[in-house]
Image (cartoon, rainbow, N blue to C red):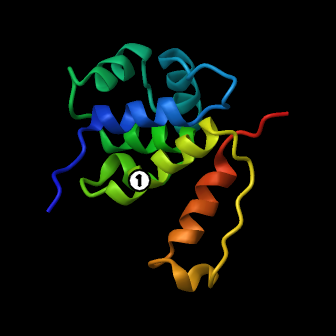
Amino acid sequence: MTSPLPLSTRLERLFQTMHKKADQPQTNESVATSASAMSGESITAGHLRDLRAGTVTETDTSVLVAIAAHFKVPAAYLTEPDCHDIDRQLKAVQAMRDAGVNWMALRGGGAEGLRGATSDDITSILSRLPREH
């Protein structure tokens, strides 16, 4: 059994992954403002900084759900201990983005060639990645 990923690792993955290739990662301030506005929760940049740094390791589930909503990822990535599948998908998205991939086609059996709903998951995450114009 794999050990749970620390919350700080998961948050950092979101900041490093969910932005356009040419852009810098979002700031704690911009994410806190957006997540607060989307959810009605009071999320400060300082609290988000402490969560990312690992100096604070727990927070209200509603805060994590709001942050996940901001990044348009499943809330389970931040709220559930077993999130390795989502983390692997985010790593793949980051690698594809960094390589300049902006379109992907599956061959050789489509979804039948992949375990479970993996192709749907990858497509869903890729569709959330900001598009470069």
Q: Is residue 40 visible?
A: no
Label 1: how many residues lie within 10 Å, few (<14), some (14-19) or many (20+)?
A: few
Looking at the image, how many numbered discs can be counted on the residues? 1
Per the image, the residue denoted by label 1 is: 88
Image quarter of the N terminus: bottom left
Q: Secondary structure at mark 1?
A: helix
For image coordinates 39% across by 50% down, the residue present is 87
Percent of width and height locating residue 24: 60, 19
Quadrant (top left/top right/bottom left/bottom right) for the C terminus: top right
Name the quadrant containing residue 104. bottom right
Check the image and name the residue furthest to the right: 133
The correct choice, above or below, for 15 with respect to 109 in the image is: above
The front one of 107 and 122 is: 107
Q: Could you say which quadrant of the image residue 45 lies in?
A: top left
Q: Is residue 82 visible?
A: yes
Relative to 28, 53 lies left or right: left
Q: Position of residue 132 (x, y in %)?
A: 79, 35
User: Which amino acid, by three-letter code, is at mark 1?
Assistant: Arg
Q: Residue at x 55, y 40 (%)?
A: 71
Say above or below: 121 vs 25: below
Name the quadrant containing residue 43.
top left
Residue at (28%, 20%) from the top-left corner?
53
Vertical placement of residue 4 versus 40, above or below: below
Q: Residue at x 45, y 32 (%)?
A: 41
- Position above or below: 131 against 8: below
Residue 64 on image: x %, y %: 38, 40
